Image (cartoon, rainbow, N blue to C red):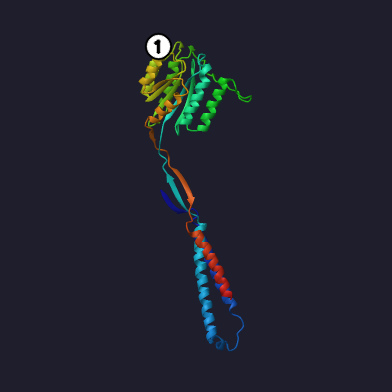
Amino acid sequence: MDVGLLLWWWMLPALLIVGGVVGVLAVVRRRRAERGKPVAHMDRLTALPRYRAAFARYRAWTALGLVVLIVGGVGTAFIAARPAAVNANQNDDYKRDILLCLDVSGSMVDVDAEILGVFQQIAQGLDGERIGMRIFDASSVMAFPLTSDYDYIVEQLGRYQRAFQGTLGPDEQFSYAAGTANGNGASLVGDGLASCALDFADTDDTDRPRSIILATDNMVNGQQIFSLEQAGQLAIDNDVRVYAINPFDWGGDPVSAQLQNVAETTGGAYFALDFADTVANIVERVNAIEAGYIETPPEVQIVDRPGPLLPILMVLVIGICLVAWRVRL
C-alpha cells in the first residue's frame, strides 16, 4: 500500500514566501529604475506602429517569462519538500522449523563428520526454514539456536565438522563435546531426543511445522531419564516429526527397529546413512510437509517520488533562459 506525503512539507510555504518577497523587491526596484530623467516628445516615439508592436512583444514575452518563473518556483518548492510515498509490505510467508539432533558419543565420533556433511547438504536443499542444532551424549547442549541465517548455519556446521575431523585451524579453540559429559552414562538417546523435542515446547511459533533430524546409532550406555519411546511421545505432544539417521543399520536388529518405530510413530521416517539417497529423501519429506503460514511485521519503506516534476522543472529552466534571451533582444 502506497501513501503519498511531503517529507519536508514546511519547505513549500517557506520557499513560496521567499519567492513572493523576492518578486515584490524586484518590482519595487524596477519601478525605481523606470523613474529616470524625462525626455521631451516621448509621445511621438511611443505612437509609432513599430514601437507599439515591439513593446507589445516585449510585454508578452515578459508575461510569459513571469508565468514560467512562477510555475518553476512552485515546482521547485514541491521538489524541495521531498514528495515521497510510504510503502508498507506485509511479508507473510510459509516456513518450517528444523532442529538437527546429533549424537556425539564415542561410538559415533568416527561418523559424525560424515553426518555433519549430510546436515550441510540438507540445509543447502532447503529454502527459508529456520535451522538449529543440539548435540548430546550423557547430557545435551544447544550448538546453535533456530535461525534463518544460512551463512551462520553453514559456518557452525563446518566448524563442528572440522572439529570431528581434527582439522581445526590454529586460531580455532573449540571442543565439539564441551558440556555433553554431565550425566550418568553415554549416548543417552532418549534424553537427547527429549531435550530436542522440549526446545520446541519453549517456542510460541505453533504455526510452523516442526521437524527433528536425529542422527544416532541408538547404542545407549547408562540410565536415561526418558526412554526413547517417551521422548518420541514428547515429540508427538509438541507436534514434531522425527527423521532418524542410523549410520550403523545392521538390517532388522532390535536397536535399529526401535529407532525406526519411534521415528515413524511421530509421522517422520527412518534412514540408514546413505549419501546417495538420505539427503534427497529427507529434503523431499520435509518439503512435502505443508509449511505454516507466518505473518511477519510489515516492512515500511519511505521512497522519494518526485514523479514528472524533475523533467518538467528542467524544461521550465530552459524556457526561462529562452525567454530571458528573447526579452533582451
Q: Residue at x 46, y 29 (%)?
A: 131
Res 167 quadrant in image: top right
Q: Closer to the camera, 68 or 261?
A: 261
Q: As shown in the figure, which amino acid type bears the numbered disc 1?
A: Pro
Residue 175 appears in the rendering: no
Q: Is residue 315 left or right of residue 238?
A: right
Q: Position of residue 147 (x, y in %)?
A: 48, 31
Q: Residue at x 44, y 48 (%)?
A: 87
* 289 versus 303 height, above or below: above
Q: Which residue is mark 1?
A: 254
- Report the label total: 1
Query: Badge 1: few (under 14), some or many (20 or more) residues near its Cα, within 10 Å?
Result: few
Res 166 quadrant in image: top right
Q: Position of residue 84 (x, y in %)?
A: 47, 53
Q: Is residue 277 left or right of residue 325?
A: left
Residue extending furthest front? 276
Q: Quadrant of the C terminus?
A: bottom right
Q: Position of residue 148 (x, y in %)?
A: 47, 33
Q: Closer to the camera, 229 or 4?
A: 229
* 186 versus 323 height, above or below: above
Q: Secondary structure at mark 1?
A: helix
Q: Position of residue 94 (x, y in %)?
A: 40, 35
Res 281 quadrant in image: top left
Residue 317 appears in the rendering: yes
* 252 versus 310 height, above or below: above
Residue extending furthest right? 170
* 301 versus 226 height, above or below: below
Q: Is residue 210 left or right of residue 323?
A: left
